[in-house]
């Protein structure tokens, strides 16, 4: 397929949703120079008026085609590309082999901090109110097809305005949750997305974070700045007095973050063209800053190269001329096996470096989830044919399945577990139970030797950056972040981890209990840890209570214990007591 479009309905009435495939185009429209961009959009509209479908994208660097004052780097590909199609095809439902991304690059923290400082200086000088700062991440397509990677990205970031477009020289895989504009029947809807908060580790914490985002003065101010910019942009093509903001500070739940959106609507003037809409709006204010011209000048100075399709727009123009485009965030561009993905956030006067850095990590979580296949995992103790705490383990796996969107059939999982129990009716065993992405389950048993105690733990040398990851909050076969900090000394049983707030979290294979001031305590889930079954049992029995424990508290710790469902409660000693 040359293109796949899976766009949600922009409104609550369900009208405007598109889920279709497109084969080789009848014609290809390409703009390689700024002078060619607006004529290309005029050609797109002409084809749509003639009853054809047009699917394509504009790079961020197309901006000066609409306003010469908008400063950008030289583009690294066509400024605009559209395929023209006679009719859509059904969505391909056949299963595809999995894809993997290798060598996923981390953003440069030093460059990030320097750019933040320069942005704050520009804001303090009164040059801008806000600048959207971004960086490019690189990886390689290590295995699988482009279409398989697109489906993996969609599973990681479901819903929204997703598109996979193969233009020949490059492939654009966009799973953007942000609507740039929907222009249907002369009514224009834009939905800028500004304001982000990470999802919580429990339903209560999740609700609290959503509430905190919706009431945050900083996040609301950031959202309002973009809404005001969009109101001004939309007014350039709107009928007098038709610009409205029917919805403000609406929260949308994405897998790894809460996002705040607002709606700006208008009735467009008669004879408005698609090129006029782009001239008024492009690029979307949510990916530039305010005011747009000066913000884009600063972006040009701070970012070393082009953004590409990222922060541009990907969309579809339907027969008759109605059009829907996303803001191309959460977007991967492939050229050969080289994959590029942008990540960024809006910087305001009160933006804090650590908080913005965490926001970047949360926003790129979709890429982390999609980079390689993984299964959900539970490790159980099997003694004389009976699995200890089986009900609790299965309940936790069901919760993880709901989070990741894996099919859950309790009878299938029970059957896998019962098979391994029947085959190992005597002795002590470690059972590895996995749930695969297709909903199938597998169980294996391994001999479980006794663990002598007390066990020795080492303190991690640096903060565990994945403490707030979904691959820490849920147990899966994705364990490379734990393996990287596991002990290399065979006499050390496990590593005690701590987060960037210098709070103790857990070990790589179990939870931690600490005796402080005569009481046994364990870190609460919001510190960044797996809700272990052994830990839950100890809390239920009153053996433990939750308490934040910091590195500075370790010298006062009277005793330690490693806790999990497999091994139980193991007395422990700490090899190092400072970091």
Image (cartoon, rainbow, N blue to C red):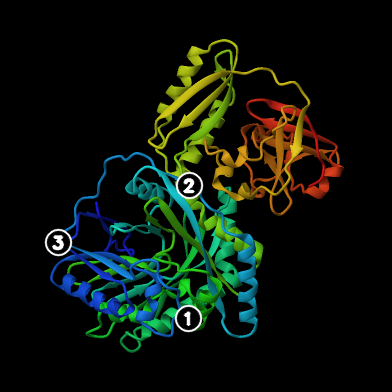
Q: How many C-alpha atoms fall within 10 Å of the one at disc 2: few (<14), some, or many (≥20)?
A: many
Q: Is residue 424 left or right of residue 449?
A: left
Q: Which residue lies most toward the left here? A: 50
Residue at 57 percent of width and 28 percent of height: 379
Q: How many C-alpha atoms fall within 10 Å of the one at disc 3: few (<14), some, or many (≥20)?
A: some
Determine whether label 1 and label 3 are within 8 Å by CB: no
Mark 1 lies on residue: 292
Q: Is residue 531 visible?
A: no
Give the image location of residue 301, x and y in percent.
54, 76
Mark 3 lies on residue: 86
What whole-number distance in Å separates the C-alpha atoms at marks 1 and 2?
33 Å
Give the image location of residue 446, x and y in percent.
56, 19
What whole-number distance in Å separates the C-alpha atoms at marks 3 and 2?
36 Å
- In the image, residue 281 above or below residue 58: below
The number of callouts visible is: 3
Q: Secondary structure at mark 3?
A: loop
Foreground of the two, 267 or 128: 128
Q: Is residue 295 visible?
A: yes
What whole-number distance in Å separates the C-alpha atoms at marks 1 and 3?
37 Å
Give the image location of residue 395, x and y in percent.
52, 34
- In the image, residue 313 above or below residue 465: below
Q: How many C-alpha atoms fall within 10 Å of the one at disc 1: few (<14), some, or many (≥20)?
A: many
User: Could you tell which of marks 3 and 2 lies nearer the N-terminus?
Assistant: 3
Q: Secondary structure at mark 2?
A: helix
Mark 2 lies on residue: 369
Residue at 37 percent of width and 75 percent of height: 62
Determine whether label 1 and label 2 are within 8 Å by CB: no
């Amino acid at each position: 397929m040359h293109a796949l479009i899976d766009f949600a309905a922009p409104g609550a009435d369900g009208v405007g949703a598109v889920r279709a495939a497109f084969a080789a185009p009848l014609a290809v429209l390409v703009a390689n120079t700024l002078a060619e961009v607006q004529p290309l959009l005029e050609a797109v509209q002409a084809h749509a008026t003639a009853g054809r479908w047009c699917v394509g994208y504009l790079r961020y660097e197309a901006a000066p085609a609409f306003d010469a004052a908008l400063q950008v780097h030289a583009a690294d590909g066509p400024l605009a590309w559209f395929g023209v199609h006679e009719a859509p095809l059904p969505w391909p439902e056949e299963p595809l082999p999995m894809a993997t991304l290798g060598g996923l690059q981390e953003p440069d923290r030093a460059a990030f901090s320097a750019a933040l400082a320069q942005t704050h200086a520009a804001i303090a000088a009164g040059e801008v109110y806000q600048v959207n700062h971004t960086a490019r991440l690189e990886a390689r397509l290590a295995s699988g097809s482009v279409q398989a990677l697109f489906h993996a990205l969609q599973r990681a970031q479901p819903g929204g305005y997703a598109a996979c477009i193969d233009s020949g020289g490059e492939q654009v895989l966009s799973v953007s949750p942000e609507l740039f504009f929907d222009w249907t029947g002369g009514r224009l809807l834009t939905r800028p997305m500004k304001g982000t908060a990470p999802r919580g580790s429990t339903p209560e914490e999740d609700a609290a974070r959503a509430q905190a985002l919706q009431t945050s003065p900083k996040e609301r101010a950031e959202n309002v700045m973009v809404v005001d910019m969009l109101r001004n942009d939309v007014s350039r093509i709107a009928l007098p007095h038709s610009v409205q903001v029917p919805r403000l500070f609406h929260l949308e739940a994405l897998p790894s973050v809460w996002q705040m959106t607002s709606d700006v609507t208008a009735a467009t003037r008669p004879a408005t063209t698609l090129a006029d809409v782009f001239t008024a709006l492009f690029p979307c204010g949510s990916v530039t800053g305010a005011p747009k011209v000066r913000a884009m000048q600063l972006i040009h100075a701070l970012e070393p190269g082009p953004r590409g399709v990222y922060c541009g727009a990907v969309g579809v123009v339907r027969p008759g001329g109605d059009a829907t485009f996303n803001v191309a965030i959460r977007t991967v561009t492939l050229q050969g096996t080289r994959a590029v993905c942008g990540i960024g956030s809006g910087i305001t006067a009160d933006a804090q470096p650590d908080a913005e850095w965490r926001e970047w990590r949360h926003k790129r979580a979709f890429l982390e989830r999609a980079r390689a296949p993984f299964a959900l995992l539970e490790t159980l103790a099997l003694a004389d044919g009976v699995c200890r705490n089986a009900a609790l383990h299965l309940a936790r796996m069901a919760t993880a399945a709901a989070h990741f969107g894996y099919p859950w059939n309790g009878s299938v999982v029970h059957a896998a577990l019962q098979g391994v129990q029947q085959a190992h009716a005597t002795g002590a065993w470690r059972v590895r139970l996995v749930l695969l992405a297709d909903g199938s389950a597998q169980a294996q048993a391994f001999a479980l030797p006794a663990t002598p105690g007390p066990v020795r733990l080492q303190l991690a040398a640096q903060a565990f950056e994945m403490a707030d990851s979904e691959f820490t909050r849920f147990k899966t076969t994705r364990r490379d972040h734990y393996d990287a900090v596991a002990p290399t000394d065979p006499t050390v049983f496990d590593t005690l981890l701590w987060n960037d707030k210098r709070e103790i979290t857990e070990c790589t294979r179990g939870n931690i209990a600490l005796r402080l001031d005569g009481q046994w305590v364990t870190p609460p889930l919001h510190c960044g840890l797996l809700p272990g079954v052994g830990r839950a049992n100890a809390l239920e029995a009153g053996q433990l209570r939750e308490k934040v424990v910091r590195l500075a508290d370790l010298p006062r710790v009277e005793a330690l214990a490693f806790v999990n469902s497999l091994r139980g409660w193991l007395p422990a000693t700490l090899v190092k007591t400072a970091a």
